[in-house]
Image (spheres, grey):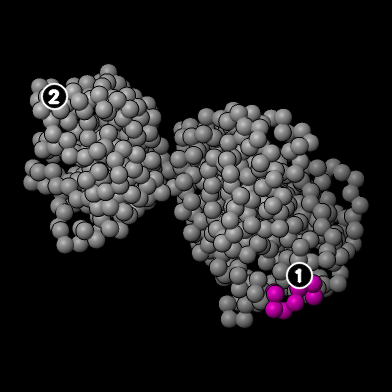
């Protein structure tokens, strides 16, 4: 796997290419290289190892040029050294390539017979000489079409031309390639993540297509040179990206930074008036209630139950005076949750709510309100509100636990201190995005997928499956991993993607056994765990993602991030509207 980038602009491009290459390093770091067109010449700099080395080589060289390409390499043909590093250039063209040209030996022989001299041991260099050969007689477009027809194997290409100072050609078969649109500049990249700091407008090439990227125009063609129209997709993961800030804001509201004390003022009941808790919500808000049940049980001696609001409101509930009913709702207007609250109020119960919208009906009619302070959530699929709900529930649980003397002072202070690290940990975990983007295609193409968790990770598995369903319209099931053998294992077939959430917590060994059971039946497992010094048993898995190292209590927050991103990129891959999925509404005010 290699990564490629191309930029055409009206300003020098070398530093922007370096920045994008850093984001592509997850695709390989055997070598890195860059080529720009400067005063009618191809100027090429390459170095072994990481992009940092390439950046250092550029310190003393002024690499000019308003058009250029870059590459990070994971070596396949030819050892990882500077000569084999991309770009590969002749006097006429310079090429970056991700993929493998399977008939390169044959093509090379033919080109050597025609007098071409090869410098490297790579398969890529045949592309350089092929196109140089065709350009002797044919137009640029015909040369590209003819060259592509000669290649067997997989590729994503970026090509610049000495005599075409305003364009980059991109082409794709098998390997991914995206085009990004800027103002007075346009881009080419192996993924949208590498282009994200420059644009949120993206198109993807399909297999067999090529494109001509100029700074004010991009044209797409099929393999025969017929024009193709492309949809421009808008990347809009703003609310997922905002989470480190929204969490920080919320922590600031509740935690006294100096004493590491939780400030919850005007709690209307004495602590010994509460002996049990019922958590009620719908959808994502309900999933946050499920997580809270695990925390309540781990950190307090209170009895806890959870309920889906639409079920609670019609059940024959046994209302208990010493029970605290907690309603969780982003909008504070969800009809079922409001009806459940109303029922509790009519029975004169203790009611509290955790909401985002503090002027909402649920907030107005609850005895006590805890806001999540995450700002307006516009995307229909709840993301930052989910983390906000979990955070406020966790804060409330810590406080109750301390007041009830279930938790000693030291542990209480330590846990509130740990909490202050959460925004940074989430920020770092967001970097797993680059890995997720490349695997989302498997989920987009699959008939269905499963999300497995145990303990604290089980509600996160439910939330991950819910996000994938609502954004990408593919079937996904969240399941407690230990339950698979009681039925759902029958669903597993060869190549089915299964996400296993296996942080290094007390359930780790158990879920790894469950993971082996699905692998043995053909599942393609994406293992999500946390960084740690302990070795993870990960034989035969398909992919592994590691979230940051954190205390067990905070892992559910971190595990959520890659799942949000997976849903996002799977939907993007399918061209769906991420902020407004079909058939849904942000606030469900009808029953
Ligand atoms: C899913 C989602 C919904 C809401 C549910 C409750 O992404 O957003 O499942 O969580 O409709 O909405 P609120 O929290 O407004 O009560």
Q: Nearer the viewer, residue 486 or 238?
A: 486
Q: Which residue is mark 2?
A: 113
Nearer the observer, 117 or 375? 117
The quadrant the N terminus occupies is top left
Q: Would residue 312 be found to the left or right of residue 11 on screen? A: right
Position in image of residue 88 (x %, y %): 21, 40
Residue range in magenta is 405-412
What residue is drawn where x is 43% and y is 43%? 235
Mark sitting on residue 400:
1
Residue 8 figure quarter: top left
Q: Nearer the viewer, residue 272 or 120?
A: 120
Regarding mark 2 in the picture, which secondary structure is present there?
helix
* Relative depth, front residue between 352 and 445: 445
Q: Compared to 402, does 552 lie above or below?
A: above
Circle on res. 269: none
Going from N to C along the chain, the mark reached first, 2 or 1, is: 2
Quick one: label 1, few (<14), some, or many (20+) residues within 10 Å? many
């Amino acid at each position: 796997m290699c990564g490629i980038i191309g930029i055409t602009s009206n300003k020098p491009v070398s530093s922007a290419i370096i920045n994008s290459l850093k984001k592509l390093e997850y695709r390989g770091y055997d070598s890195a290289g860059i080529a720009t067109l400067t005063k009618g010449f191809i100027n090429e700099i390459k170095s072994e190892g990481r992009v940092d080395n390439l950046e250092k080589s550029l310190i003393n060289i002024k690499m000019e040029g308003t058009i250029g390409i870059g590459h990070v390499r994971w070596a396949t043909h030819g050892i990882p050294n500077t000569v084999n590093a991309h770009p590969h250039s002749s006097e006429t063209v310079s090429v970056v390539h991700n993929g493998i040209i399977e008939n390169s030996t044959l093509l090379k022989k033919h080109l050597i017979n025609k007098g071409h001299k090869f410098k490297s041991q790579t398969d890529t260099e045949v592309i350089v000489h092929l196109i140089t050969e065709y350009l002797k007689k044919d137009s640029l477009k015909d040369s590209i079409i003819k060259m592509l027809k000669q290649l067997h194997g997989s590729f994503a290409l970026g090509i610049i031309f000495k005599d075409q100072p305003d364009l980059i050609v991109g082409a794709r078969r098998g390997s991914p390639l995206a085009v990004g649109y800027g103002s007075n500049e346009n881009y080419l990249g192996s993924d949208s993540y590498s282009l994200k700091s420059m644009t949120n407008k993206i198109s993807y090439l399909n297999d067999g297509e090529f494109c001509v990227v100029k700074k004010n125009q991009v044209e797409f063609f099929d393999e025969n040179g017929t024009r193709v129209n492309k949809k421009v997709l808008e990347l809009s993961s703003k609310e997922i990206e905002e989470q480190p800030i929204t969490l920080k804001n919320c922590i600031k509201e509740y935690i006294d930074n100096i004493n590491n004390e939780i400030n919850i003022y005007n709690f209307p009941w004495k602590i010994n008036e509460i002996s049990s808790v019922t958590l009620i919500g719908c959808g994502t808000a309900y999933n946050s209630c499920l997580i809270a049940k695990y925390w309540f049980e781990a950190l307090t001696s209170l009895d806890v139950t959870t309920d889906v609001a639409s079920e609670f409101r019609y059940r024959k509930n046994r209302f208990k005076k010493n029970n605290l009913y907690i309603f969780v709702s982003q909008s504070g207007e969800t009809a079922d949750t409001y009806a459940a609250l109303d029922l509790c109020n009519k029975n004169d119960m203790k009611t509290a709510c955790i909401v985002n919208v503090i002027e909402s009906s649920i907030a107005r009619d609850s005895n006590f309100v805890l806001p999540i302070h995450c700002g307006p959530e516009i995307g229909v699929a709840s993301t930052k509100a989910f983390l906000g709900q979990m955070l406020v529930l966790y804060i409330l649980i810590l406080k109750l636990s301390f007041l009830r003397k279930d938790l000693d002072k030291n542990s209480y202070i330590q846990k509130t201190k740990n909490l202050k690290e959460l925004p940074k940990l989430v920020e770092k975990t967001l970097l797993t995005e680059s890995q997720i983007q490349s695997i989302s295609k498997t989920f987009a193409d699959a008939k269905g997928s499963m999300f497995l968790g145990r303990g604290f990770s089980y509600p996160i598995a439910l939330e991950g499956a819910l996000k994938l369903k609502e954004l990408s319209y593919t079937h996904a099931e969240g399941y407690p991993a230990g339950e698979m053998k009681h039925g759902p294992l029958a669903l597993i077939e060869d190549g089915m993607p299964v996400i296993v959430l296996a942080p290094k917590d007390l359930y780790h060994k158990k879920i790894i056994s469950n993971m082996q059971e699905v692998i043995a039946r053909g599942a393609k497992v994406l293992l999500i765990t946390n960084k740690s010094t302990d070795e993870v048993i990960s034989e035969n898995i398909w992919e592994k993602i590691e979230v940051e190292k954190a205390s067990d209590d905070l892992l559910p927050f971190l595990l959520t991030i890659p799942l949000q991103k997976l849903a996002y990129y799977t939907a993007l891959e399918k061209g769906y509207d991420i902020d407004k999925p079909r058939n849904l509404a942000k606030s469900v005010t009808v029953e």
